[in-house]
Amino acid sequence: MNILDFETNFETVAKEFLGTDLSSFTSLQLVSSLDRINFTLPRLEINAELQGAEDPPTKDSFGRFNYSQYSLNLEIKIITDMSSDVTDEATGLDPSDLHRKLREEVRTSMLLSSSNWTTPTVDSVIVSGAGSPIVDGTYSKTGVLNNRSVFTKPAGASYGKISYNESFEWELSVEGESSTDIYYLGTGGIFHPYDASWSTVVANAEDPAPVVSKGYILEDYEVKYMRPAGTDYEVDGDLGISTLTYEIKFTTIPSRWEVS
């Protein structure tokens, strides 16, 4: 189940926003802890290490008690070849200055004020404030129908679904094992459901219609706290390695506990 793969989720998101923020370093390779690729230089190695859960456990959206508060250490290693006399082609920096600049840019990307863990993404949407709260929650992109993305929110035997119909409307439905009920319709959003105007389908749903917005990259969790915990520098042969460590506290989103 995706919500329990803490390390992969955090490492994947970190690779995405660090890759965007450091895109000017065209020769830079970004890897996470379980990537099986041929390593190149310079590179960033991203490693998330779960430290454990914190009391007390809380109820998820099914009314079950689960641990929802966790601590995690995120290590970002900057690895460059310090023996080379060649300047970086993209930046024109020598190896020492390149290492320093990468360290600075990683710290900038990891600032609390930066767009990192909460960056909006078109690959998920958030539904909130509906008169029928069964539809509220985070929906992930799971397919394509009528040339538009389909988003779903697992929830036990039934699940929420947002899709585009042949009448050029977005449908927000709840699908069970043998039936499909449309709760809300969105019109005017040509490409994305968060651009549509939503209204209630009286036969199934209650007012008000929900607010549909872009989802976040880190859709299973909410980062509550992030602190730079220190930097270690070492030389390993010809390699210069700076390890930046961040202490992170996060909570799981109750509606994402779809495990039965």
Image (cartoon, rainbow, N blue to C red):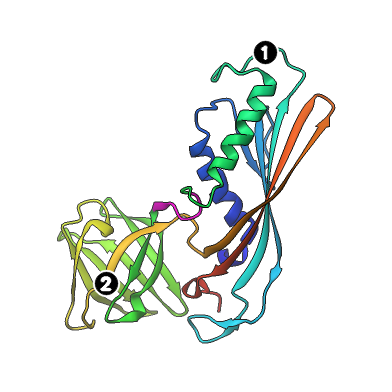
Q: Amino acid at mark 2?
A: Pro
Q: Amino acid at mark 1?
A: Val
What residue appears at the point 53 percent right and 74 percent down from the top-left corner?
257
148 or 97: nearer the viewer: 97
Crowd rating for badge 1 (residues with CA inside 10 Å; few <14, some 14–19, many 20+): few
39 or 73: nearer the viewer: 73
Q: Which residues are magenta?
A: 116-121
What residue appears at the point 51 percent right and 74 percent down from the top-left corner?
258
What residue appears at the point 36 percent right and 65 percent down from the top-left corner?
126
Lower sequence index among marks 2 and 1? 1
Q: Position of residue 167 (x, y in %)?
A: 14, 61
What residue is pinned by disc 1? 86
Q: Position of residue 198 (x, y in %)?
A: 20, 67
Q: CA distance from mark 2 to mark 1?
A: 57 Å
Per the rendering, the mark at residue 31 is none
Label 1 SS: loop
Check if residue 117 falls in the magenta segment.
yes
Query: Is 176 left, or right, of 91 in this rendering?
Result: left
Look at the numbered discs 2 and 1 and tell me whether their residues touch, using CB distance below 8 Å. Answer: no
What residue appears at the point 70 percent right and 27 percent down from the top-left corner?
80
Query: Is 246 left, or right, of 112 in this rendering?
Result: right
Does residue 211 lie above or below 28 as drawn? below
Check if residue 98 falls in the magenta segment.
no
Q: Nearer the viewer, mark 2 or mark 1?
A: 1
Query: Is 73 left, or right, of 162 in this rendering?
Result: right
